[in-house]
Each structure stands twice: as structure tokens, then as C-alpha cells.
Amino acid sequence: MKNMMFAAALAAAVVGSAFAGPTPVVANGTYRLFNHDGGGAQPPAYGLRLDGLDLHHNTRIYSFDFENAQSDMKMTVNHANGTIRIFGQVYGGRDVGSAYENPANGRVGLWQIDFTYRNGVQTLSSGEIIAQQSPLNNGFIKPLFNSTVAAFAGNPLIPLVDFMMPSFHLGLNHRGEPGVSGWGWVNHSNRNHVAASDWLFTVGAEPIPEPATASLGILGVAMISALRRR
């Protein structure tokens, strides 16, 4: 009887492993995002570039520093829902060479970003995660500073959509950057693609602890301390 039970368990394990999918390079969770060293317009370093964002000259470089003290960019991956959300606040704007333009000109400051990939998010056999191009993959960037520049006046939601096929990747060792990177072309302002406009960031190695998990950890420490005092 025991042999039969062992054989059945072994068969189930073999079947399960045969149908198990590939292990994605990023598990479910929310992660902090950082700049990528492979950007072609650095310095300043950035995790997103949207050239021509002010609608005047496509050659005007706009980049966004994910590691600035005011920035707080995150990414949530949900494999069950097939979504990747990139969101948060970021400092940046017009890049005039090796630094940002004077913020007084109304093109540099703090921005809000919220973008979600909803279509064709899948894990390849290599573990790389991709998204297929779709109008469903969209979001916005919004200036949070006051500006008299026409494209930014009144703090509008500037549309962002994906571009190319596949439109987004999460993979290892991209352009020699260790760990996981995220990259993919985007379009902005309801315009055709402007080169260069793309994500290019790195992903924190571990997900950010959920508030409930963190609270349980604090509670556990408190309980241990109380027991020790007794």
C-alpha cells in the first residue's frame, strides 16, 4: 500500500513538473526602480526618456532620474492578472547636456507617472517577461510643478502608450547591467514615435514588504521582547 501511495505521489510530481511553466525573472510583488547605466543620453542618469515632450523639438532630450532624492518609482507585477504597472513620482525634465535645464524655465521638476501593461504579458522559456503591443497598454505622465510652457501649463495628463512588438521586456543582464532590467519603447502626447522615447531602468532585487507583513514583523519583535522581559 505504501509503495502504491509513493508511486502515485511520484507520478503526480512528474506530471506537475512537466506542465509547470518557466520561472519568471520577476515574481509577484511591488519593486523599487532605479536608473540604468546603458542610457545613451547620460548624464544625468535616468530610467525613462521622452524626447520632444514639450512638443517643440523632437531633438530636445527629456529624461527622468529614478534615483533623485525626490523620486519614488515602483513597479507591481501580477502574473495572475497578467499586468505590469509602473508608477510613482520622479524628478527630471529637459536635459541640456550633462545636467537639467534651469527649473525656472518650466521644463524641469517633479512628475507623476502611472502606466500599466495589460495585454499579452507572458513569461518566455528563458524567464524573460514581455508584453505585446496594444492600446490597452497605456498611462500618463503629469507635471506636478507650475509651468507656463504650453505643453505643461495647467498640469495636464500627458498620454503614454506602448510601441513596437513586443513593447516591453523584463530580463537579465540587459546591456551589461547586472540583475533585472526593464526596457521598451513608448509614445507620448498622442504623437507618432519620437526617438528616443523609452523605458530603461533596473529593478530592485527583492519586492517591497507589504504593510501587513511589515506590521506582523514588528508585532513579532515586540512579543519576543515582552517575553524576554518576563
Image: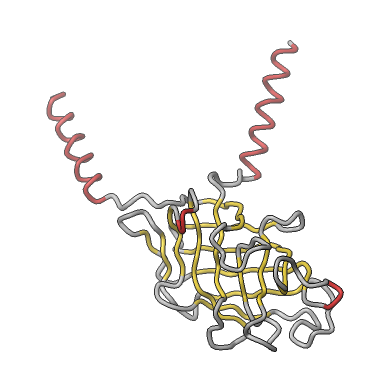
- Is the residue 116 above or below the residue 223 in the image? below
Q: Quadrant of the N terminus?
A: top left
**Residue 157: quarter of image:** bottom right
**For residue 195, side relative to residue 153 (left or right):** left
- Front residue of 16 and 3: 16
Q: Is residue 118 above or below residue 74?
A: below
Residue at 71%, 68% (x, y): give it: 112
Outermost residue toward the right?
A: 104
Q: Residue furthest front?
A: 97
In the displayed structure image, the side of residue 58 where residue 226 appears, left or right: right
Instruction: Identify the image quadrant of residue 68.
Output: bottom right
- Image coords of residue 49 (percent x, y): 61, 71
Residue in the image at 48% along x and 78% along y = 163
Q: Which quarter of the picture shows residue 55?
A: bottom right
* Front-lying residue, 149 or 82: 149
Instruction: Name the residue nearer the viewer: 126 or 154.
Output: 126
Q: Position of residue 144 (x, y in %)?
A: 78, 71
The residue under the point 85% across, 76% down is 146
Residue furthest out toward the top: 230
* For residue 40, above or below residue 180: below
Report the label total.
Answer: 0
Question: At which x and y percent is residue 156?
Answer: 74, 81
Quadrant of the drawing holding the C terminus: top right
Colour scheme of the rendered structure = secondary structure
Q: Is residue 206 left or right of residue 55?
A: left
Residue at 56% across, 46% down: 207
Image: 212 above or below 154: above
